[in-house]
Amino acid sequence: MRIIHAADLHIDSQLSGLSSALADHADADLISGATRSAFRGLIDWAITEQPDALVLAGDIFDGSWKHTGTRRVFVEGMRDLADAGIPVVMASGNHDAASVLMAEVIYPPSMHVLSVESAETLRLDDAGLSFHGQGYATPAIEHSLAAHYPLPDPGLVNIGVLHANVGGSSGHDNYSPCTADDLRSLDYSYVALGHVHARRSFLDGQRTFAAYPGNLQGRSVRETGPKGALLVDLADPRAPHVQFQPLDVLRWEVIEVDATDPARPMSSADDVLAAIAADHQQLRAHSGSLPLIVRTRITADPRLLGALRASEELTELVRDVVAGSTLEKVTLHRAPHEESDAPVVDAALRAELERAIDDLAPGEASALLTEVRTRTQALLRDSGVDLSSSTALSALIAEAGQELLDELSAGDTP
């Protein structure tokens, strides 16, 4: 008895933080269609594995806009699973709550969409499975759905399906909030979770009683590492065996280089570039032939940091040493002041600042860029900065934001 558990597919969601210059990139088609390709990989893998059911725990789509191409891709996948005799159990999440993409479509009888009105139970008697769950009727659910899930069915293997923030995970809206103890108390064999994009299991001793598979395809530098779905073996309902299957078609990674690390001393830009090259080689070895999108974060003391910022070719030099991968961005960070016991900026504010910097991309801040052009036209006329380029101005704004974060975090560093 086995199920495949996937969540947060976000089909047709675009990868963020990438320059418009990638329009002519060799992997441009792969990048723009990554979420679709990962979804297709999920379908093909399920057909190969022949589980008793595929469980989709919310956010299959990335919004409620009506895009027939997105819907068609999903429906074709569901029909392929139906032809292979694989039932699907799905609950909507906050991104596809009552989505128009789910309306006015005739899905195969083997696809079961859980109610958004109240928790319901779906029994697959031939497989000996009983699914319990509820989808989102609105994008924001601020009460615990799990609190109203039914008692387990005697004689069947019970599985919960829930899109929720368990334990108040940071970086995600606190929708359908609940605790690990709340899920344990349901007394199901397994709870298939969605919403949090990082893979995580909840254990009771050695028993996995609930898990997040993470999203199917990383979409930004905040979603690094392998992404995919889970194969859950329920041969022993009291001790599910959970196995991760990577399904992403390209991968985000961050190369962290700390030039102040005494175990890896660096005193020049050449030393930094050599460290980036070595770390990149290790990433490539672990990812095989999978295309990588990498960001490099360089932390250095003020002297080396100044030299790096003064280099007009730094980004191109880094691009050369990560050849074979797509360079998303190079960020420079000032090392914390030696006399500072802790950053001046509290963790929550720092996270918000970093997210704002990460999310800034060409074309996404047109009003801000227009204001920058207006106010700096005379000042930058002879600077060599291309005021007509949104990409160039976005990079300058992001760099200024990072410098602000460095200053705030370093306190009174001279």
Image (spheres, rainbow, N blue to C red):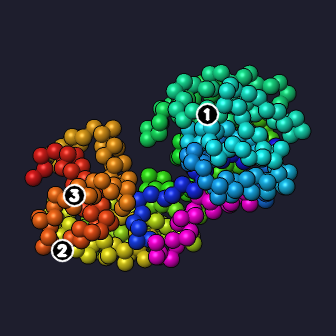
Badge 1 vs badge 3, beta-carbon distance below 8 Å: no
Secondary structure under tag 2 reads loop
* Residue ID for mark 3: 372
Secondary structure under tag 3 reads helix
Pick whichever of labels 2 and 3 is earlier in the sequence: 3
Q: Is 71 left, or right, of 361 in this rendering?
A: right
Q: Amino acid at mark 3?
A: Val
Look at the image and tell me whether residue 272 can be seen: no
Report the residue that reaches farthest toward the right: 126
Crowding at dot 3, Cα within 10 Å, few <14 / some 14-19 / many 20+, comes out as some
* Residue ID for mark 1: 136
Where does residue 203 sit, x and y in percent of width and height? 61, 35
Q: Say the numbered circle drawn on residue 384.
A: 2
Where does residue 315 sit, x and y in percent of width and height? 31, 71
Span highlighted in magenta in the image: 23-45
Q: Amino acid at mark 2?
A: Gly
Q: CA distance from mark 2 to mark 3?
A: 15 Å
Q: CA distance from mark 1 to mark 3?
A: 41 Å
